[in-house]
């Protein structure tokens, strides 16, 4: 990326006066609270598509849980919040394999776990462990699935991605969208798609072109004005 682009190896994202570590996996970590936040896992998306005759390799859940295991090991959180659409459809928890259920149960040992309900998974079964909530507030920060644009909000749902030019070629990556007061997190799931950060949906949330894309690179986070993405 060009000289105007800021890069950060140990990147942080500030939201309503709170500093979060931005993990290259697409997770946020609030160190003072020992809180890890992920969004839009979309587990069992592959099996959902297969049921409709669209054949995808059935490895998305294993891949997503593997990435989640790595970020949990990195930060060893006291609490994990999954910001909705953790499962691709209402029946997805029933399609989990026994090993994948065991993996999810192991994640919850010794820590609090909160599933935020999403539009894809509005009713989660009790046998997944953890607690289910529509939103969670900690101090000035509110965690919910669908963004409203409120100050202090961290949400998912929109799967932001950014397309930028670098060294004569185009790169498209998932990103955090943030203006310092609110943030929309990238989708964490292996098969989750993305919505351009230039889409009108983001203008409605941030109400200004001055918000930033925190783009997930290979070894660092790249911070670029959303207005410079396309």
Image (tube, rainbow, N blue to C red):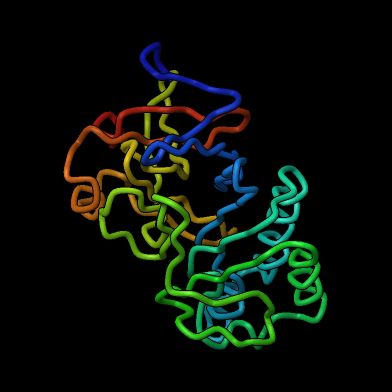
Q: Position of residue 170 (x, y in %)?
A: 41, 31
Left or right placement of residue 185 versus residue 132 in this view: left
- Quadrant position of the C terminus in the picture: top left
Q: Residue at x 54, y 29 (%)?
A: 11
Q: Position of residue 38 (x, y in %)?
A: 56, 56
Q: Residue at x 39, y 50 (%)?
A: 140
Q: Is residue 6 above or below residue 82?
A: above
Left or right placement of residue 49 versus residue 212 in this view: right
Count of residue discs: 0
- Quadrant position of the N terminus in the picture: top left
Q: Position of residue 108 (x, y in %)?
A: 74, 67
Q: Residue at x 67, y 65 (%)?
A: 112
Q: Nearer the viewer, residue 118 or 191?
A: 118
Left or right placement of residue 181 versus residue 18 in this view: left
Q: Residue at x 74, y 57 (%)?
A: 66
Left or right placement of residue 42 versus residue 113 in this view: left
Residue 143, image quadrant: bottom left
Q: Position of residue 155 (x, y in %)?
A: 40, 57
Q: Residue lying furthest top in this view? A: 3
Q: Nearer the viewer, residue 143 or 26?
A: 143
Q: Nearer the viewer, residue 49 or 8?
A: 8
């Amino acid at each position: 990326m060009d000289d105007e682009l800021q890069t950060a190896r140990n990147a942080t994202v500030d939201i309503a006066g709170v500093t979060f570590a931005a993990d290259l996996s697409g997770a946020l970590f609030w160190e003072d609270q020992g809180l890890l936040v992920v969004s839009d896992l979309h587990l069992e998306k592959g099996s959902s598509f297969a049921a409709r005759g669209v054949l995808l390799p059935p490895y998305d859940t294993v891949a997503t849980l593997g990435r989640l295991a790595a970020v949990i090991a990195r930060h060893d959180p006291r609490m994990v919040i999954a910001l909705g659409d953790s499962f691709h459809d209402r029946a997805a928890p029933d399609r989990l394999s026994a090993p994948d259920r065991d993996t999810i149960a192991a994640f919850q040992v010794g820590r609090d776990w909160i599933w935020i309900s999403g539009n894809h998974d509005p009713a989660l079964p009790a046998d997944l462990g953890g607690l289910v909530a529509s939103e969670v507030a900690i101090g000035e920060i509110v965690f919910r699935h669908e963004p409203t644009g409120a100050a202090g909000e961290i949400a998912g749902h929109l799967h932001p991605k950014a397309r930028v030019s670098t060294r004569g070629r185009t790169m498209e990556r998932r990103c955090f969208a943030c203006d310092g007061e609110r943030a929309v997190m990238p989708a964490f799931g292996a098969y989750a798609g993305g919505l351009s950060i230039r889409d009108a949906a983001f203008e409605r949330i941030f109400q200004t072109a001055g918000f930033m894309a925190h783009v997930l690179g290979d070894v660092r986070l790249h911070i670029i004005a959303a207005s410079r993405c396309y």
